[in-house]
Image (cartoon, rainbow, N blue to C red):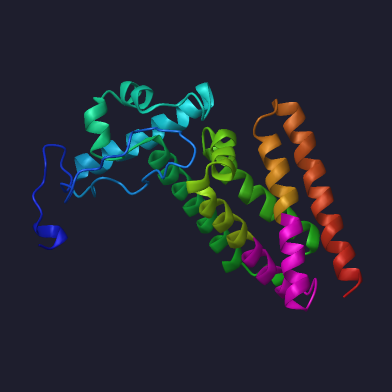
Amino acid sequence: MSQTDKPLNDTGILSPESPRTESPDSNKPGMSRTLEPRNTPVQKRAQERRATILEVTAELLEEVGQDDLTTILVAKRAGISVGTLYHYFPNKYAILFALAEQWLGEIDQALRELEAETVETLSLKRFVDRVVDRMLLTYTNQRGLLPLVQAMFGVPELKDLDTAHDELIIRAMARMFARLEVAERPAELSRLGRAFLEVNHALLLVVVNQSKTDSLKTLADLKYISLCLLERAKSQF
């Protein structure tokens, strides 16, 4: 039976071929947690409900953190039953995985926009300003980002997304650094991309969690550090 031939259940999503047996939200050492969605939303109502689940999960991450987040809390905030939530996600880690994937999609879009610009015509200062400001938007727009990032790093099933996040940024920055003639050797471009990533990722997480006055100061510090990194590399090129 093809996916489109499968019957729709009362939530407007494709019914699963077989039931899951793992314990939802289980955190027992050594237990493998299923992250695949139970069903695929195909109707608009189901897609909107999935989006709501992700939205309220982000809100709850800000309020209670990853450790105290449960599917019961998510379902209550979303205004649905836990049983209905399980039609979409088998456990909280599957929701976190989907939320992290969505954030990576935003980062990918930001990097594509930056690479589409004529960055080779920009001064290093203007380039740094443009990149940091654009990436800041992806950090500011994602609610619950700090606990989400912590989950990506600390939850084994989400670790691949953490690696994908790093590789995505490193490769994009290396390509743009080459166009700016900051360095030539691929290994050096990747090294600089890694350094740029680590500095920006760490400080952008600080910026979005500070008061307005402090965040502006930290943002200026970040741009200065990033500019120094590239100017030093280019002077040795």
Residue 180 makes an appearance in the image: no
Instruction: Name the image quarter holding the N terminus.
Output: bottom left
Q: Residue furthest front?
A: 30
In this rendered view, identify the residue nearer to me: 97 or 56: 97
In this rendered view, identify the residue nearer to me: 15 or 47: 15
Q: Position of residue 14 (x, y in %)?
A: 16, 48
Q: Main secondary structure of the magenta part?
A: helix
Magenta segment: 170-196
Q: Position of residue 57 (x, y in %)?
A: 42, 31
Answer with left or right where residue 159 lies relative to residue 10: right
Answer with left or right where residue 206 lies relative to residue 235: left
Residue 11 makes an appearance in the image: yes
1 shown above or below 139:
below
Report the residue at 80% width, 53% height from top: 226
Q: Residue furthest bottom?
A: 185
Residue 190 included in the magenta stretch of the image? yes
Answer with left or right where residue 100 lies relative to residue 48: right
The answer to which image quadrant residue 138 occupies is: top right
Instruction: Name the image quarter holding the C terminus.
Output: bottom right
Q: Position of residue 206 (x, y in %)?
A: 70, 35
Report the residue at 42% width, 39% height from top: 93
Report the residue at 26% width, 35% height from top: 86
67 shown above or below 115:
above
How many marks the image carries: the answer is: 0
Answer with left or right where residue 170 lies relative to residue 54: right
188 shown above or below 196:
below
Q: Position of residue 37 (x, y in %)?
A: 30, 46
Residue 175 included in the magenta stretch of the image? yes
In this rendered view, identify the residue nearer to me: 104 or 72: 72
